[in-house]
Image: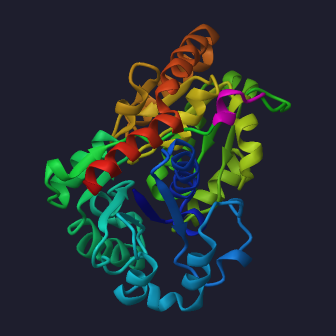
Amino acid sequence: MRITIDATSALLRSAGVKGYTYHWLRHLRKQAGPGDEIRAFPLLKDWASLDHEHSALPLAPTIARLAALHAANVFGAPVLDLLLRGTDVFHAGNLVRQAPGKARLTATIHDLTSWIMPEVHTESTLRADRTFEERILKRADGLIAVSENTRQDAIRLIGIKPERIRTIHSGVPEQYFDAKPSARAKPYVLFVGTVEPRKNLDTLLDAWRSVRPDLREHFDLVIAGPQGWNSASTMARVRQEATYLGYVPEAEMPGLVAGASLFVYPSLYEGFGFPLVQAMAANVAVLVSRTSCLPEIAGDAAAFVDPLSLSDMTAQLTRLLESSEERSKLAQLGRARAERYRWERCARESLAFFREIAG
């Protein structure tokens, strides 16, 4: 079975999708059987010259060179059909604008934020996602959803037939399971993610101000992640009311996460929630929103909060910061639950899915 994967997302997309593509592809290669061939290429001109952390991504050199010649043409069918000659399954990314003629078509749905929360996206993002829906998602022979919640969203909002979409949970990199805590001057509560409206940081900052002064004196609130769209006012508060680290290199992130006394994730909507799973794997107690996929992913291994309730978030933060025993209990539960989110399992289930699609 020959599978060709559009790996452009490993270079371009948000941190979660980028990491998914990179680690998923590597583990697909490791799990592939004797009769399997996994190929990948980026639909991006001059991809090799980009300064990105995943430059070691294993790509098919010949295909990559061809794709880089005329990136605009690759988005259409003629060049893509040439590149995919002999392919049984083509796994498309969101830059593909037309399905190939003969290969079976698949794709991964990471979230449905453009449908559920269009107000937190730019017009260009909304247009791109609608194009992906019409030209790929509605035509695909099979789809992967990264959580059951995302699968149900796709069925409900896009009209995907249930039998055409399968839930295959994403994974967490091995280094989080073995992470050594980074040393900081004070114990800290940590948030990791892009500073943008969907992450709900204003409510977190409001709750943090409402926590008792003695607890705020003992713990720092640390926020790690790049500045996102429509976040100027939130960024001003973050810089003033928390310790803001900005973008943290991937190699340093496991230690930062493992060193936290508490990981807090007040997001309004997620498709999978990579930072949540990374914190659980790193043996850190988690306080997470009771919304979208997050209860599904965390199970009974996290404390939950209403992300829109300032009083609830303040109370939960206070309760967990007061009790090291409760944090230790949640950390142990989270570490055990994170075992189900290994990339090996994700790759194994994905290959089985591809074999079914290929027939």
Q: Is residue 196 left or right of residue 113?
A: right
- Tell me, yes or no, if residue 354 can be seen here: yes
Q: Nearer the viewer, residue 326 or 79?
A: 79
Q: Is residue 56 left or right of residue 93?
A: right
Q: How many marks?
A: 0
Name the residue furthest front.
34
Identify whether 34 is placed above or below 18. Answer: above
The colour mode here is rainbow
Q: Is residue 77 magenta?
A: no
At horizontal 19% and vertical 58% (from top left) the residue drawn is 157
Q: Nearer the viewer, residue 137 or 345?
A: 345
Identify whether 326 is placed above or below 246. Answer: above
What percent of the width, then of the height, locates residue 214?
70, 22
Q: Nearer the viewer, residue 215 or 194?
A: 194
At horizontal 60% and vertical 77% (from top left) the residue drawn is 62
At horizontal 30% and vertical 65% (from top left) the residue drawn is 105
What percent of the width, then of the height, locates residue 222?
69, 40
What percent of the width, then of the height, locates residue 307?
40, 39
Quadrant of the rendering where the N terminus is positioned: bottom left
Q: Nearer the viewer, residue 147 or 230?
A: 147
Name the residue furthest top.
325
What percent of the width, then of the height, locates residue 149?
28, 42
Q: Is residue 179 magenta?
A: yes
At horizontal 43% and vertical 28% (from top left) the residue drawn is 298
Per the rendered image, the range of residues in magenta is: 174-180
- Tell me, yes or no, if residue 7 can be seen here: no
Identify whether 299 is placed above or below 118. Answer: above
